[in-house]
Every structure is written in structure tokens, then in C-alpha cells.
Image (tube, rainbow, N blue to C red):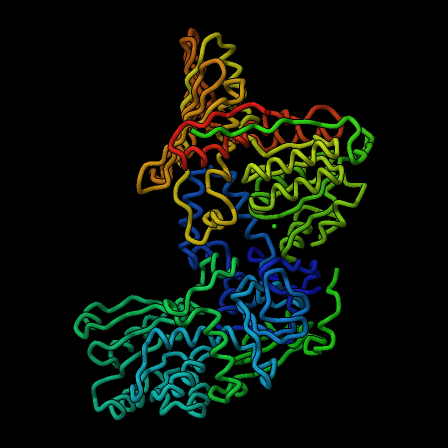
Amino acid sequence: MKQVVQNYKSGELAVLDVPVPGCKPGGVLVRSAYSLISTGTELMKVSEAGMSMLGKARSRPDQVAKVMQSVATNGLPATYRKVMGKLDSYTPLGYSLCGVVEQVGDGVDDVAVGDLVACAGNEHALHAELNWVPKNLYAPVPDGLAPQHAAFGTVGSIAMQGVRRGEPQLGDVALVIGLGLIGQLVVQLLTASGVRVVGVDPDPARCALAERLGAAACGDPASAAVEASVAELTGGHGVDQVYLAAGGGSNEPVELAAKLCRDRGRVVDIGKCRLDLPWNAYYEKELDVRFSRSYGPGRYDPEYELEGRDYPIGYVRWTERRNLACFLDLVARDRVDVEPLVSHIADFDDAVETYQRLKDGELKAVAVLFRYPGGTDRAAAGQTPEAAAPTVTVPAVHVRSNGGVTLPARSAAGPVRLAFVGAGNYATSMLLPHLAERDGVTLSTVVTTTALSAANAKRKFGFAEATTDLDAVLGDKSIDAVFVVTRHSSHADLTRKALLAGKAVFVEKPLALTEDELAGVLAAVEESGNDRLQVGFNRRFSPLLREAKRQFGARTGPASLRYLVNAGRLQHGSWYLQQGSEGSRFAGEGGHFIDTASWLLGADPVSVYALAPAGNEDLQIVLRYPDGSTATISYVTTGAPSFPKETLDLVADGKVLKLDDFVRASVHGPKKWVSSRLPKARDKGQNAELAAFVKAVRTGGPMPVPLESLVATTAATLAVQTGLAGGAPVTLAGPR
């Protein structure tokens, strides 16, 4: 299928051939009929992409701050790779469309194949021939409403949420500053609510359009006519609400709002404009400044948007989806007229030219629609689209000598053919750059559920194929190994399927989120006879840590290990916070630290004791080992961001090994050893781990980490949650 994309580094716009997205549970696959260009938001993004790197930095100081924090935490080389990887990737455009349901995912019962729906979201309602849209981001189109008008649903919801934040009353007078697409819709919604509206915009054509659509008066912000109209309509008191629907860097909108608003009036920011509030003017009138968050309640909440968890109507009357449905109803009943806003309808194949004309100013428009070939043919919707004091028992590892599948025979002289399932930030910044440069490796196929991420990985790293069809990859006998680099909840199932298909498997941590998932993976090993498995516990492969362990030497007595993980707080909206589906944060990444401790101590733990201080997410975990050694892992989120992320001390036999965040290490004993103080990069072992895995696949030799160790580490990680719930140490019993 085709999709409009942009490279934020170069500014290039393209209509790209990408794989069809998969139809996941909890959503529907939609074939686009019309999608709407937001001439404000999207053109701002297109313009930013054409800036120099310095210009981009100046326009997004929030992102610069994140980059600087990443440098402090992960080092300059890793941060540079991550940032440049993101910049030099195709990103999607679009967030408002109407289309026909082609496939319905599990758990969806309110629409059927062939239904017309309006869709929202800058990750789901893209300028693409097909989109997967979760349940709370689509709404059925009322009978009789034209699909090109229903494509306004998202921007209509944005305007509606802004009006709701203003709390207008019958008979109020409102000022709308900025008469672009959102401003024109705000004018109509206010008028439909019994509010008299004065509009402000420097473009006379937009002022005339707003008056035609119901505004009492409109004019240039510098014109005395606007102030006179406000005085006449309000008896000199000023407007009840001001709606800021303008963009740009000028501070004039907020200054004009203060000037024309009544005492204790409301100012609602809908657009993205400068907000340098003149203190005296806002203080003296005690103005109420409010922000409108996009489409409404639910926006940026992954449990609502991705998992389909609705807010009870008794507590949240107007959510994203209810705003979307309400706006469609108003348009269907002719209470809002979007037809006059349509300046141009372009064929989807002409998307790049259309954007260029808008950017150059050749095409002056309030709203532009893309029309998709065959998208409104409901009869075609049924066609198949192109081609989830307790004791923890550590499971036993059994491998049949003659399993249920025949492991692929390969020539040691030929390249190792790899497939990737998942191509997110970690895969593209920490794994694929190493593999793409490695001799003797062929990147065969990349599989993702979203089309553009697969296309980006194919372009950047040289995959031969990009697809959303996992079964085809697992059935391809030429592929030697599969990398599973998806969200945590899918790791165990994908690993099980790949093992049963006879593939060597590299799965990023965690291997499993529950004991049942872990048992399922081991059942696949036993059934297939395929134990070619590696989990991405990379720290034991760090050259710095390996050299420090060598310098420390053998030990004769028990050891005491202390590991501080200054994990920090997650950003709001991170999928790591979706504990209901993705497990706890420690379950997701704690295996890293347990594996490192076990490798340094040369054994697997026999018990786990976990404590969590009241009021925060910090964890204290004590691991006990067969020879009496102990490891204490402090996993904290409340530390200072400027402090190193990982520090480790190992004490035994009169010696101390110290590791400072994979930047510096030292060993204190009869002889002192200190690593270089100026390392080239913070190396946490990914490259060496990948080299060991590829060598094992190529030669048929042992996997880099014994399967028994991978299982023991996973069981110990899962035991942390068991221990927290029970408040007592958890014994890691051997297999029964």
C-alpha cells in the first residue's frame, strides 16, 4: 500500500510503498476514502523539517532538553546514534480521515466490515491507504453524511473540546483569534450554541468566510473595527471568552485577548501560539487562562487510546470518541457546515505536489482533502486486505534429541540470514546498526504491525523485505534466526512460535512476564528439540565489565554485591507504564541486573527477597546464592537524573571491584587496576553479544548463555513480584 511520509532530517516528502498494517485485537483495519490535511499543524511540521539542525533545535527546545539528559545518562555516542536514527527516518503525516472498515479485530462488536467510520489520531488516522485504528479512536459515520465531510471529524473534535473548555452560555459573546481551519469550526460551534462571535484574522477572505458561517463581525487584529464590534455587542464590558486558534511566534493574540476580554472572563488556548502573558493585564481582570488538550479526555492516555478502556459517562461526559461522534452528528444534521471550508481536493497520488504547493503559498487553502482511489466503494470493503512465604519453581529444561521439527541445516561458509520482528527505538539504535555493519550477516526480512516502521528499517538497514506477515517469515526455511524486539507482552508467544518453526531466536528481555508464559516457552523447546535461544542480557558482554572481572580474578569465599540502578521516572504516556498488559517495569528490565549479578557470582540465585518503600516505585531486592554470596539490587526511580544510571560494587577475599556506569571500572586488592578515564563510548555489550549469537548460529556451537541460566534469571525476576505480594523471601526451588 502507499503512505505519505517525511524525513525530518532532510525534509524530503514522499509517497512510499509500505506493508499493510496488521489488524490487531481491539481495533479495525480501515481503507481510507478521504483524509484531511491540517493546514496549520501539518504545514508547521513540514516547515520545521526544512530547517537547519540549529533551526530545528530552536523550534523544539523541549526535545533539546531531552537530548541533553540522554547524553548525561547514556553518553554522547549512544545518544547521537539514537537522535540521528530518529531524525533520519520517515515519519507519518495526517490525523483525520474517513474510510471503510475492511477487517474487524477481536473484541470489536460495534462496527462490521463495510461500515463507514471517521478516524482520529496522529499514529492511526494517517495519510495512508490502510490504517489500523483502535476502538476509542473511531466512530461510525451517520447515515447520509458524505465521507469527505466525515473526514473533518478529528479537527472538529479539537474545535469542540476547545469550546467545551470555554463553557459558553446562551447569549454570551466570544472572540475567536485565528480563522484558519480550527477557528472556522469554533465559530460555527459557538454560533450553534447561541453565542455571538467576533472573529479576528489578518486575511480578509477568511474573515468573510467566518461571517458567512455565522460570525457577527470579523476583522484584522490591527483594525479598530474589531474593538468597536466587541464594544457594541457587549455594552462595553468585553467578551465572555476568547478562543486562541492562531499559531506562530507573535504575542499579539494573548495581548489582544486581555484587551477585549471582560473582567473575570476566560481565555482558552487551542492552537500553538506564543503565550507570554502580560501580567498586569491578566491580573487586573483576573482572567481565567485554560488549555484545551486536543480531541478531549482520553488523549495521551494509552489505556484509553490503545487498550480501549472507556471512561464512565457519569464521570467523564465528553471523551475523545464522544466528541468525535457528537461532531459527526452536528454535521449530519446541518448544524455545522464543512463544505465551504474545502478549498481543494487532491488525488492521493499527488500528495507530494500538494504539500509543496501549500508550503510555497501557491495553493491558499483552509482545508485540503486527499481522495483515495476506490475508498468509497462499500462493496469492496469485504475483500481481503493485502498481504497477544511462597515458593517459585524454576522450570526444568528438557530438550528432545529428535524434536517435533527439523532444525535447519546451514553451511558455515554462507551468511547468517536474520529476520527482525519489531523495529522500535531499541532495535534501530542498539541492535541493527551493529548487525548492518557485520560481515557474514544478511538482513532478510523485517516484520512489524505498523507499515511505516518496517519500511523505515528496510530503507535504513538494507533488509531485503518488509512485511506485516509473521507466518510467512516463520515459514521461510532460508531464514536462520529470528530477533523478537517487540513489546514485552508478546515476547513469550513470539519466541514460542519461532522455536517451533525451527529458528534460532534472539529475544530482547524479558523472556516472559508470567510463570505460565515461561512454561510455554520451555514446552516449545521440549516439543521441537530446538533450544537455540538467547535473551538480550547484554551487560555480561560489556568489554569493560569483562576486563574488570578478569582483573578481579577467582575468589574462594562468599561475595557481597551491591548494584544501584538509578532508573529515573518514566515520561507520561510511556508504554512501560501499561502494567496491566506489559507487566511491571522491573519485570520488563530487571532481568538485566539479576543476570549481571549471577554472571559475576558464577551461579544462579536460590532465593529472592523484595521490599518496596511506601509511596514510591523504588525496589530493594536481595538475592542469595548457593555459596552464601548475596547481591542487593536497589532499583530506584526517585534519584537525581544527573547521577549515573548504574553503579556496582563486588566485595570478596579482600578485593573490591567497582563499576561506574560502564564508563570506568577499577579493582582494589593487592594490586590496583583502574580502567582508562576517557573511554571512547559507554559500551553495555550489545555488539559483543550480537557477535556471539551470530557465531553460534553460523557454527552450530553452544549459545552464548546456557538456557538453564536464562530460565533461572527469568524465574528470579518474576519472583520479585511474588515476594512483594507476600512480604516474605521467595525460595527458588529446583524443578520437581
The outermost residue toward the left is 284
Residue at the (37%, 88%) spot, across then down: 218
Residue 338, above or below 615: below
Q: Toward which corner of the image does residue 199 lie, by quadrant?
A: bottom left
Indicate left or right for 41 with 502 as reference: left
Indicate left or right for 178 with 451 as reference: left
Q: Position of residue 650 (x, y in %)?
A: 43, 18
Q: Nearer the viewer, residue 718 or 13?
A: 718
Question: In this rendering, does residue 681 appear at all?
Answer: no
Residue at the (64%, 54%) spot, across then down: 449
Q: Toward which corner of the image does residue 281 lie, by quadrant?
A: bottom left
Residue 474, above or below 190: above
Q: Position of residue 12 (x, y in %)?
A: 61, 61
Q: Position of residue 714 (x, y in %)?
A: 55, 32
Indicate left or right for 443 with 54 as reference: right
Question: In this rendering, does residue 276 appear at all?
Answer: yes
Residue 529, above or below 368: above
Residue at the (58%, 70%) spot, across then down: 110
